[in-house]
Amino acid sequence: MTMLGRIKSILSSSRPVVDPAAFQASMSSPSVQPEIATFAAGCFWGVEHIFLKHFPPSQNKGILKTAVGYTGGNPLVTNPSYNLVCGGATDHAEAVKIEFDPSVVSYGELVEFFYRSHDPTTVNRQGGDTGSQYRSAIFTHSPEQATTAERVTEEIQAKYFTPKGKKIVSEIIPAGTWWDAEDYHQLYLFKNPSGYQCPSHKLHW
């Protein structure tokens, strides 16, 4: 979808009132520290939406809260705007930052769901969305996350993509500076149920 088309979707979609607190939860065990997982898998509206649909905080499935934003770009560009990122010049990816309870859902399970819910075999593209901002990437927050991401990637490659003659192209790189996207992007598809959603954002197995 073109940037103009997505802007039209923003302007034309109906907007029910959504309470962000309904998409947040507390840790199930005070003795466990929350962790952060950061994924890029195309338009961040759909990525956030599918994670929250399948791990709703209200049902204690491990995700505590999410945010959409920009990461992995030129470090000289600070606080980038949606329009600037969509132009592709900053090399930021549209991404989702997930705070989760590792005593309920493991990082490896989230990485597997990341692969399950988009097409990781297309370079800088998901569906009709093209450009480096739509690349597939895992931004790791510790050496342990990097090791897990590499292991799960190898397992998913062997089980689901090698038999089809396809190769995962997702980046696995250390997380850098994170910038929250503008407020209207947060929980976008919950606020705008008829808004644009990339067709790649579905369960592929």
Image (cartoon, rainbow, N blue to C red):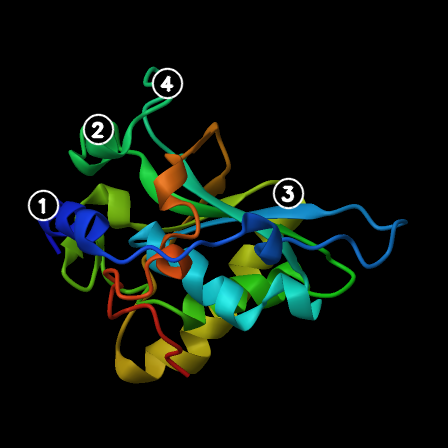
For disc 3, the marked residue is 143
Q: Is residue 121 above or below residue 12?
A: below
Q: In the image, which is nearer the foreground, mark 1 or mark 4?
A: 1
Q: Measured along the vertical axis of the image, is residue 105 above or below residue 39?
A: below
Q: Residues within 10 Å of mark 4 (few under 14, many from 20)?
A: few
Image coordinates for residue 85, horizontal then vertical, percent: 24, 33
Say whether disc 2 or disc 3 marks the residue closer to the N-terminus. Answer: 2
Q: Quote the CA–CA distance across marks 1 and 3.
A: 39 Å
| For the residues bearing labels 4 and 3, Cβ distance under 8 angstroms | no
Q: Are marks 2 and 3 in contact (CB under 8 Å)?
A: no
Please indicate whether residue 46 sits to the left or right of residue 98 in the image. Answer: left
Which circle's residue, 1 or 2, is located before the other in the chain? 1
Instruction: Inspect the image, locate mark 4, and give the three-letter code of the amino acid beneath it.
Output: Thr
- As drawn, the residue found furthest toward the right would be 31
**Which residue matches tag 4?**
78
Badge 4 element: loop
- In the picture of the structure, the residue carrying the numbered disc 2 is 84
Spatial CA span between label 2 and label 4:
11 Å
Per the image, label 1 sits on a secondary structure element best described as: helix
- Amino acid of disc 2: Leu
State the residue in front, 156 or 25: 25
* Circle nearer the N terminus (4, 3): 4
- Residue at horizontal 13 percent and vertical 56 percent from the top: 1
Question: How far apart, in angstroms, are the residues tagged by discs 2 and 3?
Answer: 31 Å
In what element is the residue under mark 2?
Answer: helix
Binning the other alpha carbons within 10 Å of mark 3 as few (below 14), some (14 to 19) or many (20 upward) gives few
Q: Nearer the viewer, residue 140 or 77?
A: 77
Q: Position of residue 39 (x, y in %)?
A: 45, 51
Tag 3: residue type? Answer: Pro
